């Protein structure tokens, strides 16, 4: 999509990757907006390669058993539960 | 409450004693409060009640503060006006009919309208500094790693920090004193490194608000004045003259990398958002698909829940982020954005080796009128030109009221070296 205009098909494809269902009018609106925004992002081509000497240190800690959220609290916000588990939709 | 400042009005009492005893604090609605709903300004989390407190909320309670409510915000922090909130827009108490800025618009408005003494916001690309500037209050975006993000609902986690609002620099700094410091639940937090400039041993941030700028050197990045509103620029130079009169000196500096900061910021923030917001599928928490077909599979149910739960701007950013990370485009967008981020960091480090602080207008424009700006997302993104470079460089910055243009508030942004909060607090307090 970088060299061509963004097509509605492109938007549909990305929406399916992101698991967001869109209405036809949203697809039409996003198609135009994405073309403008991605064209603007293209100017990143002018950025030189930069040495990235990140000063990172790993933060390690010993494995220790400690209290965490109990399952009752963890399930409190779930729309559906069954036998102390989250209940999700069918996998296929 | 005609301004629509709070999404949830609820008083949460703190301890009897502590440095914030007797103070009221408004908390942005993306910061988890145990037993009090935390919506992120989204339909997706309209009924979500966190089972635990964010670290900053525990620290507020321990410090004796009284939380007075959860404030309105752009949905998941994605916006510059607080208008993308599912709960409606917030009016600007300092400039009625105008937006309060965003995304922490409710928090800034709460302090401006005297609904709270202090407030907490979060800043991913300017979301504390922009509303502080638009509402005529003080806001601080701390150095990345100074304040714990545990319990902050993540949007762009390599960029964001929780920070304070106050009606004066000293007040805001006193809230920073309470929330700053390492947290074992956020591995990106750290003790501020030692060294003369950053030595905070036994010294509070609030005590740095002494207004002493004699001998302070200020760098003014010319790129951050280009294209700014004339009245804003005039107000900005008045503030610099004010600092000069108190013994500071300034020189213009150049940061060529910031020309690419907005696109780098949006590529990185959207990419992180697409990953962070993948958790909202309506199974463990959040909005579940209302129109459920009997034979819907996993993917269809998730897609439907996310269609119903997210607003336009959130969908836009998730999709663009997914695109920037997708096969064939990762190197072109995400990797180049990381290059630009390293370049911005380098530029700021160099400029701050010459000057003590860098100064610019916080926002290149005065507050938009309510409803003025929702139609064109790209124009909105460009308004963040002066704030996003600071997040890319992980640095601390403060926005301090500098006056008005045509009756609308203007803020000055002061940027310091990493963990140089005391320096920007001192410089900012000289503008009061």
Image (cartoon, rainbow, N blue to C red):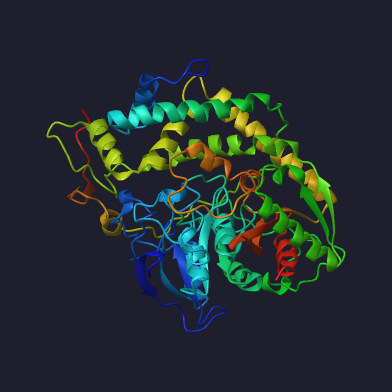
Instruction: Please state if B143 lies on the left or on the right of B334 as rendered.
Output: right
Along the viewing direction, whichever of B64 and B9 lies nearer the viewer: B9
* Looking at the image, residue A10 lies above or below residue B205: above
Q: Position of residue B342 (x, y in %)?
A: 68, 37
Q: How many marks?
A: 0
In the displayed image of the protein, which residue is found farthest to the top? A3
Quadrant placement of the C terminus of chain B = bottom right
Instruction: Please state if B382 lies on the left or on the right of B259 as rendered.
Output: left
Q: Residue at x 33, y 61 (%)?
A: B37
Q: Position of residue B388 (x, y in %)?
A: 61, 45
* Looking at the image, residue B73 lies above or below residue B68: above
Quadrant placement of the N terminus of chain B = bottom left
Snapshot quadrant of residue B158: top right
Say if residue B415 shows up in the picture: no
Q: Position of residue A60 (x, y in %)?
A: 58, 48
Snapshot quadrant of residue B426: bottom right
In the displayed image of the protein, which residue is found farthest to the front? B406
Q: Position of residue B412 (x, y in %)?
A: 68, 58
Say if residue B164 shows up in the picture: yes
Instruction: Please state if A62 lies on the left or on the right of B363 as rendered.
Output: left
* Looking at the image, residue B199 lies above or below residue B397: below
Instruction: Please state if B227 lies on the left or on the right of B129 as rendered.
Output: right
């Amino acid at each position: 999509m970088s060299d061509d205009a963004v097509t509605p098909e492109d938007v549909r494809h990305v929406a399916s990757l992101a698991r967001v269902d869109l209405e036809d009018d949203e697809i039409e609106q996003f198609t135009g907006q994405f073309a403008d925004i991605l064209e603007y992002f293209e100017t990143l081509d002018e950025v030189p390669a930069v040495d990235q000497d990140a000063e990172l240190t790993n933060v390690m800690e010993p494995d220790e058993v400690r209290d965490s959220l109990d399952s009752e609290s963890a399930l409190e916000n779930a729309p559906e539960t069954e036998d102390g588990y989250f209940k999700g939709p069918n996998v296929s | 409450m005609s301004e629509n400042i709070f999404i949830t009005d609820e008083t949460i009492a703190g301890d009897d004693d502590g440095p914030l005893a007797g103070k009221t604090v408004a908390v942005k609605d993306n910061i988890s409060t145990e037993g009090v709903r935390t919506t992120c300004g989204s339909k997706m989390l309209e009924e979500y009640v966190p089972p635990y407190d964010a670290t900053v909320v525990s620290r507020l309670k321990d410090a004796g503060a009284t939380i007075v409510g959860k404030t309105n915000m752009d949905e998941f922090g994605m916006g510059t006006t607080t208008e993308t909130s599912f709960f409606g827009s917030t009016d600007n108490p300092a400039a009625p009919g105008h937006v309060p800025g965003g995304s922490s618009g409710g928090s800034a408005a709460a302090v401006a309208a005297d609904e709270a003494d202090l407030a907490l916001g979060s800043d991913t690309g300017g979301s504390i500094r922009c509303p502080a500037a638009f509402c005529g209050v003080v806001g601080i975006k701390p150095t990345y790693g100074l304040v714990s993000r545990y319990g902050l609902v993540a949007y762009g986690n390599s960029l964001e920090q929780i920070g304070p609002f106050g009606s004066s620099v000293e007040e805001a700094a006193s809230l920073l004193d309470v929330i700053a410091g390492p947290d074992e639940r956020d591995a990106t937090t750290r003790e501020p490194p030692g060294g003369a400039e950053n030595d905070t041993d036994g010294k509070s941030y609030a005590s740095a608000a002494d207004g002493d700028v004699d001998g302070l050197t200020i760098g003014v990045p010319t790129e951050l004045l280009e294209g700014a509103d004339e009245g804003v620029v005039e107000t900005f130079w008045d503030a610099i003259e004010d600092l000069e009169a108190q013994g500071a000196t300034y020189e213009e500096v150049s940061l060529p990398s910031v020309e690419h900061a907005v696109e780098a910021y949006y590529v990185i923030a959207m990419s992180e958002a697409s990953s962070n917001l993948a958790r909202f599928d309506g199974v463990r928490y959040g909005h579940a698909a209302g129109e459920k077909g009997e034979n819907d599979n996993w993917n269809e149910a998730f897609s439907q829940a996310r269609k119903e739960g997210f607003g336009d701007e959130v969908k836009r950013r998730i999709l663009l982020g997914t695109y920037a990370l997708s096969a064939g485009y990762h190197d072109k967008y995400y990797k180049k954005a990381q290059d630009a981020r390293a370049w911005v960091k380098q530029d700021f480090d160099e400029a701050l080796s010459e000057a003590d602080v860098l100064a610019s207008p916080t926002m290149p424009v005065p507050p938009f009128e309510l409803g003025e700006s929702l139609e064109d997302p790209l124009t909105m993104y460009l308004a963040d030109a002066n704030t996003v470079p600071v997040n890319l460089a992980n640095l601390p910055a403060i926005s301090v009221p500098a006056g008005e243009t045509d009756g609308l508030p203007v803020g000055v942004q002061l940027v310091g070296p990493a963990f140089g909060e005391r320096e920007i607090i001192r410089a900012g307090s000289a503008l009061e």
